[in-house]
Image (spheres, rainbow, N blue to C red):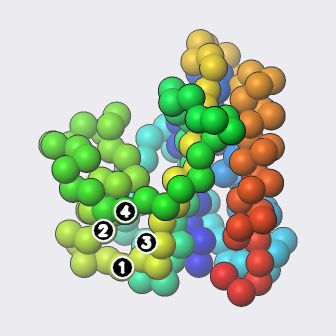
Amino acid sequence: MFRIFGYGNPFRQDDGAGHLLAPMLLEDLRKAGNDACLVLGHQLLPEAACDIRPGDILVFVDASLERYPNGYILEPVHPDGTANQGLNIHSFGPSWFLALLEDLGTGFREAWALSISGDSFDFDDAVTDTCRQRIERARTEFRERFCRSEN
């Protein structure tokens, strides 16, 4: 099963990229015949670890301050318990989440981060036009990589 985690603040312009893109990925995966579920939130929370199973493919979708060459990055994520010293929920990221899964003895098949470069994080419930274009390009790459029935 694919487990899509979309997070960020949908009321802070491009920080809402995860909330826009994650449901699109869910739709694409299901149309391709894959079993998938969606978790949306303002932040990635430890409680989401409760439902993970050893065969799951995890996809973490969010906005980033990083300037990626293509406007987004889709890359494998690996456990790293040193990524967050102490529990600061605002910096609880995918690598730390995967380390938590290891600590809990929970397996997963693979994990990916899909981060969209954001331009504006002001108060507004609409992403910028540039971010929307990046979301579409990221969605296209994701479909090409994962939307096959043999996953």
Q: Residue at x 27, y 62 (%)?
A: 99
Tag 4: amino acid: His
Q: Position of residue 128 (x, y in %)?
A: 74, 21
The residue under label 2 is: 101
Single out the residue that lies furthest toward the bottom: 150
Residue 141, image x, y percentages? 74, 56
Question: Which residue does the numbered mark 4 point to in the structure image?
Answer: 78
Q: Confirm or deny contact between disc 4 and disc 1 (CB under 8 A).
A: no
Q: CA distance from mark 4 to mark 1?
A: 12 Å
How many residues crowd around disc 1 within 10 Å: few (fewer than 14), some, or many (20 or more)?
some
- SS type, badge 2: helix
Secondary structure under the numbered disc 1 in the rendered image: loop
Q: CA distance from mark 4 to mark 2?
A: 11 Å
From the viewer's side, name the closer residue of 55 and 76: 76
Q: Which mark is residue 51?
A: 3
Between marks 3 and 2, how big is the CA–CA gap? 10 Å
Query: On screen, 5 above or below 52?
Result: above
Mark 3 nearby-residue class (10 Å; few <14, some 14–19, many ≥20): few
Residue 98 image-quadrant placement: bottom left
Q: Are marks 1 and 2 in contact (CB under 8 Å)?
A: yes
> Looking at the picture, how far across and down is residue 75, in whole percent?
53, 56
Report the amino acid beneath label 3. Asp
